[in-house]
Image (tube, rainbow, N blue to C red):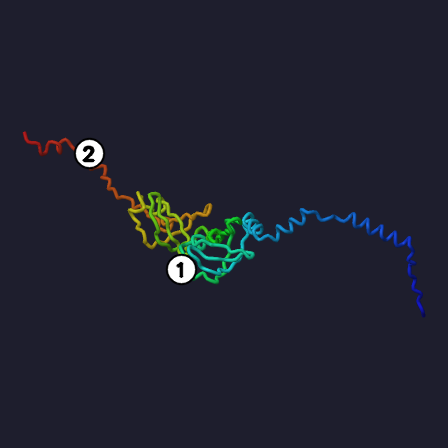
Amino acid sequence: MNEELKTEEMTPENVQAEETVNSQAAAEAPAESMADYEEHLDDANHWNLVTKYMEEKTVLPVKIEGVVNGGVIAMVDGLRGFIPASKLSLSYVEDLETYLLKEIEVHVIDVDQANNRLVLSARDILRAKEKKARQDQIASVKVGTVMEGVVETLQNYGAFIKLENNLSGLVHVSQISQKRVKTPSDVLHEGDAVTVKVIGIKEGKISLSMKALEQAVEEVPEKVEIPKSENIGTSLGDLFKNLKL
């Protein structure tokens, strides 16, 4: 069975109508301005990109590609970035060569296009991670937990104890012993091994007690002998018995 295909006859009137519709659609479409082109150019400018990274504190994964005097070199979006040795780790780095080809995370901390200067830092990221890890550790400690530790430092108000999980806590002078302790140094010395109990956690600080682990000291009542009533009085004869006239 043959199907008849119907096509619209292309007349001059139809062509003109189609052109009118296309013109209206083009007019309604938002036109790109020079500002749009400039924005695209800004995005393509690597110096503008690293400036944005600095403003937004973007964490950037980089690879150490060179060692220079006082620091190391890493590339960011095709730009040569310098990481000072003091910004490379939380502690002093004795041999910068150990960082060569190592992958680390950095922030942009200084951008100076005029002097072709781009400075990066890993230290603040590492510090934030360390703080978060400490907070997580403290959150895992429960009040009432008994732990082993070592006396780290002594102050007039108490002793700081380095705990077995690498955290630190304070034994206040009033929590050292059930006996009265005037100053911690009277009974403790740095390096002493101690057993402590967690008695409180507040604002990231751990309060410890040694006193809570001591057995209660029971006071032994003093034995006092009271004389019998018949022995209390003294006769007149007793008073003059040894009296010589």
Q: Is residue 223 visible?
A: yes
Q: Which mark is residue 120?
A: none
- In this view, which residue lies farthest toward the bottom? 1
**Disc 2: CA contacts within 10 A as few (<14), some (14-19) or many (>=20):** few
Q: Nearer the viewer, residue 213 or 30?
A: 30
Please give the name of the residue rendered at 55% of the width and 47% of the height, measured from the top-left corner.
55
- In this view, which residue lies farthest toward the top? 245
Return the x and y of residue 163 as percentages of the image width and height: 39, 54
Return the x and y of residue 186 as percentages of the image width and height: 28, 46
**Residue type highlighted by circle 1:** Asp
Return the x and y of residue 204 as percentages of the image width and height: 46, 48
Please give the name of the residue rendered at 58% of the width and 51% of the height, measured from the top-left corner.
49
| Between discs 1 and 2, the one toward the N terminus | 1
Q: Which residue is identified by label 2?
A: 233
- Left or right side of 6 for 225: left
- In this view, which residue lies farthest toward the left? 245
Instruction: Determine whether the residue tagged by mark 2 lies in a helix, strand or loop.
Output: loop
**Residue type highlighted by circle 2:** Gly
Instruction: Determine whether the residue tagged by mark 1 lies in a helix, strand or loop.
Output: loop
Q: CA distance from mark 1 to mark 2?
A: 94 Å
Q: Quadrant of the N terminus?
A: bottom right
- In this view, which residue lies farthest toward the front? 114
Q: How many numbered marks does the figure carry?
A: 2
Q: Which mark is residue 95?
A: 1
